[in-house]
Amino acid sequence: MLLVPLSAAGLEIERHLSVSASGNPREVEVIKGEVLARFAPSVSSGAVRAAARARGGDDAGALALPGWRRLKLPPGMRVADGLGHFKGMPGLEVIQPNHAYRPTRVPSDPFIGSQYALSRMSAYAGWEYEVGSSSRVTVAVIDTGIDGTHPDLAGKLVGTSKYFNPNGAPGVNDTPIDACGHGTGVAGAAAADTDNAAGMAGISWGGRLLSLRVFNDCSFTSDPAVINAINHAATLHDTPDYGKIIVNMSLGEEGGACLPAMQSAVNAASDAGVLLLSASGNDASAVNSPANCAHVVPVGATDAEDKLAYFSSRGPEMAQRGLSAPGVAIYTADMGGGYASVDGTSFATPLAAGAAALVWSAKPVYTSTDVANVLRNTADDLGAAGPDNNFGYGRVNIHRALRYAVEGTLSGFKGEAKAIAFPNPFRPASDRILSFSFPADTAGTGLTVEVYTMEGELVKKLDGLTWDGRNAAGNPAATGVYVFLVKSDSGKARGKFAIIR
């Protein structure tokens, strides 16, 4: 049984096995220690209270519905048992769990409309399961450093930043600074401060960031610097201050083999439980080192249409253990408190690392291998069927990964079989962005979404998978029910949603 405090109401929830109308069992969240019950009009509140107390519980008051009341269960009794426990009460007509409802998780960050990768990776639906706050997970960014003054990153840094000199000297404490901006963009993509009504959204809202700087500038670093940084990250894994450690290496040696010293460092970190991800490279050639080292997940880049980015490096390591993520026109943090659109497998990698942080937060009992396997086995297969040298196991799908981690299954999600819009109903004043999901067999090039009124009038044609609720003229679309059509060269799918203003 999982108990999670609902701080706003001082309540707790528990997982309850419910059976849907189709007969499929599914775990849902319900309020711990109580149920809802409807009684015949002839039954007084006093009679309900007396009968509930005779069974070790109590009456917790009436709802704003005729005959409905909250009943407190005997201390320690689970909801599943309580439903049967109260069934013999006089005048009882219906008894049910008190379901827990959460706000639909669409963050308030104003630049989220520029982040097409969130829709491509099904982040909005994934955040319904986990935003990265359930367990401590830290993304250790081995890079050019992180600008610790950036408003979207300052509050996400944890522990002591370190600098590892390319000359191989031991690491020293470092002010969180960035030598040239690269590491700041990487950090933003993985775990920028999210739902703070400012800037952009990171993949893992609750994930923390650790700056392990190995560059003096944006030119080059060395094996010893990277090895020392990996070794340091390994010492922090599963410690109280850092929790689970994910190492993000958005760096590489073009055409370089994984030499023994680097492989030894990777092996030691992997044995310590660390998850390591590295950019496959930007030379459209062989997978770079350290991405080609055993026990490292190489990450390639896709574009807004789920095609392989022209620069993304490829090879058998991708087919063996690799993943892909968007890496073209990635909107992320920049030095000096700004934001920029950047390209490269350098920025696909932290998107995958952020997804890994969400999975590990949702399922802290997982090993690093478990997390990597969940991401691989739930990815959207692109290119040739099955794992291949270009896309690896496919483009990361955050929703599928988290659904599997939390529920242990991928069955039953409507978006796997039909197009859906979420949140639905869409309330533009609070939700800000409507996101569309569609069946895998609809994915392809030339993807567009067309929004229509129920009368068939075109409201807006979109070239992405999000909508701010404004029509082609820039005016707010009215309250009502709308139809949307997702089309690509691979097929089309149709769905409905409602707008409430």
Image (spheres, grey):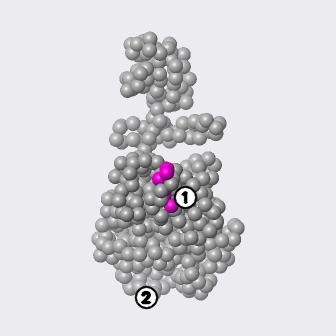
Residue 485 - label:
1
Q: Residue 171: which quarter of the image?
A: bottom left
Magenta stretch, overall SS: strand
Amino acid at circle 2? Ser
Q: How many marks?
A: 2
User: Is residue 124 depicted above or below 103 in this figure?
Assistant: below
For disc 1, the neighbor class at 10 Å (few under 14, some 14 to 19, many from 20) is some
SS at mark 2 in the image: loop
Of the image marks 2 and 1, the number of the one nearer the N terminus = 2
Q: Residue at x 59, y 49 (%)?
A: 413
Element type at mark 1 = strand
Residue farthest right in this picture = 385
- Residue positioned 47% across, 15% down in the render: 40
Q: Are marks 2 and 1 in contact (CB under 8 Å)?
A: no
Q: Could you say where residue 365 lies in the image, as x and y percent from the top left?
A: 55, 52
C-alpha gap between disc 2 and disc 1: 47 Å
Q: Quadrant of residue 341?
A: bottom left
Q: Within the magenta stretch, is there residue 422?
A: no
* The label number, if any, that marks residue 219 in the structure image: 2
Viewer can see residue 264: no
Q: Nearer the viewer, residue 470 or 26?
A: 470
Expressed as whole percent of the image width and height from the top left, the position of residue 487 reads: 58, 63
Mark 1 is on which residue type? Answer: Leu
Q: Is residue 103 above or below residue 289?
A: above
Depth-wise, is mark 2 or mark 1 nearer the camera? 1
Towards the viewer: 144 or 203: 203
Q: Residue at x 43, y 23 (%)?
A: 68
**Residue 438 screen position, x and y as percent:** 57, 58
Q: Is residue 145 left or right of residue 19?
A: left
Q: Where does the magenta region start and end?
A: 450-455
**Mark 2 nearby-residue class (10 Å; few <14, some 14–19, many ≥20):** few
- Up-down relation of residue 24 to residue 200 (above or below): above
